Image (cartoon, rainbow, N blue to C red):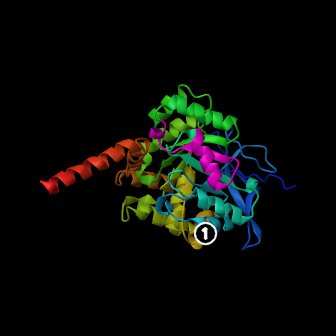
């Protein structure tokens, strides 16, 4: 049996409860290179993840996401490509409408269930119990590793809604429960009555919103909640030419990396896990290679922090999602609104 290989990596002083672990037993067999892809995971005491040689619970630090530009489409081939190139953590959601395709890709991979970490999210359609069973049926699994509340508004009553999540964990439908797009205020309200804390809070996180999110990161650290980032590359892909570009490119030249890799290295320096996506094999390999690069210096990290504070404000994706889920929670209201508009148009053209 393979031993659990460990290596020391310096983490921010405000995240003493996390440590990085390298272990081949967590890794995925890469059919193209005919070797094990070594994985990197964050150890967290509240997460349950079975690994053959390590008793500690583990959360993969990088996930392949099926939201963003991939939602509402057939992602079977892209998920399969991600798995073949070394991704073992696949992130989906009820709202993305990609769960069925994630399940097909898992089946086609031929990998044992224990080799993969699957996250999906409750997006307010049906009750949480109904939703997770529908998600499991679509993915073709008996449990998921992580089940999240996609946005706070998905649970109008956080107390009773979270109790349902705790019951699903107890019943074995999910190994861990978490949240997404939660602010400090949302977490404080949840933790007033929660028996089980959320293991993860998935948020949009990049250099341009680091200053506004720093307090949230510190709060999650104190509460022993892992922060997972999506949209980390927005600072250079959606706001090109901003203050961050120059310092990121300088760091990239020093370590022989791409700008994307530098951003991900910066995210990792904050003790934050990553959700990312791509349709190309080369880009996926680029993302996974981040763990093999020299670390950023403290000066480079500070320079990115400073440049990010000068940049454009974060895009308020949470507000956008909140509006989407408000309408999902009130389909009758949507129907009545459409009928009212149509009736008004009929009256207008008639008279």
State the residue in front, 81 or 36: 81
Q: Residues within 10 Å of mark 1 (few under 14, many from 20)?
A: some
Is residue 257 visible in the rendered image? The answer is: yes
- Judged from this view, the residue extending furthest toward the left is 351
Is residue 13 visible in the rendered image? The answer is: no
State the residue in front, 6 or 34: 34
Magenta stretch encompasses residue 235: no
Magenta stretch encompasses residue 133: yes
- Judged from this view, the residue extending furthest toward the top is 193
Q: In terms of image quadrants, where is residue 83?
A: bottom right
Q: Which residue is mark 1?
A: 77
Which quadrant of the rendered structure holds the N terminus?
A: bottom right
Looking at the image, residue 349 lies above or below residue 150: below
Q: Which residues are magenta?
A: 129-155
| Residue at (40, 44) in percent of width and height | 331
Question: Residue 259: x and y, percent?
Answer: 49, 66
């Amino acid at each position: 049996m393979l031993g659990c290989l460990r290596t020391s990596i310096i983490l921010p002083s405000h995240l003493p409860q996390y440590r990085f672990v390298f272990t081949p037993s967590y890794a995925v067999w890469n059919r193209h290179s005919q070797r094990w892809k070594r994985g990197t995971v964050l150890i967290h005491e509240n997460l349950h993840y079975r690994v053959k040689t390590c008793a500690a619970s583990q959360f993969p630090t990088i996930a392949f996401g099926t939201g963003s530009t991939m939602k509402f489409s057939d992602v079977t081939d892209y998920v399969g490509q991600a798995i073949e190139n070394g991704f073992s953590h696949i992130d989906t959601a009820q709202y993305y409408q990609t769960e069925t395709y994630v399940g097909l890709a898992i089946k086609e991979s031929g990998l044992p269930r224990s080799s993969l970490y699957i996250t999906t999210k409750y997006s307010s359609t049906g009750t949480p119990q109904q939703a997770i069973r529908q998600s499991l049926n679509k993915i073709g699994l008996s449990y998921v590793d992580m089940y999240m509340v996609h946005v706070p508004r998905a649970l109008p009553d956080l107390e009773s809604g979270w109790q349902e999540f705790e019951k699903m964990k107890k019943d074995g439908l999910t190994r861990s429960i978490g949240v997404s797009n939660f602010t400090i205020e949302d977490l404080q309200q949840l933790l007033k009555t929660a028996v089980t804390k959320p293991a993860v809070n998935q948020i949009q996180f990049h250099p341009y919103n680091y200053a506004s999110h720093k307090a949230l990161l510190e709060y999650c650290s104190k509460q022993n909640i892992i922060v997972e980032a999506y949209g980390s590359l927005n600072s250079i892909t959606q706001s090109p030419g901003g203050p961050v570009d120059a310092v990121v490119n300088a760091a990239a030249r020093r370590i022989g990396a791409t700008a994307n890799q530098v951003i991900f290295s910066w995210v990792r320096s904050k003790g934050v896990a990553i959700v990312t996506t791509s349709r190309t094999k080369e880009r996926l390999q680029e993302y996974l290679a981040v763990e093999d690069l020299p670390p950023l210096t403290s000066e480079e990290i500070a320079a990115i922090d400073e440049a990010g504070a000068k940049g454009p404000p974060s895009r308020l994706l949470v507000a956008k999602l909140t509006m989407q889920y408000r309408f999902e929670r009130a389909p009758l209201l949507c129907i009545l609104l459409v009928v009212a508009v149509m009736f008004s148009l009929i009256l207008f053209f008639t008279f």
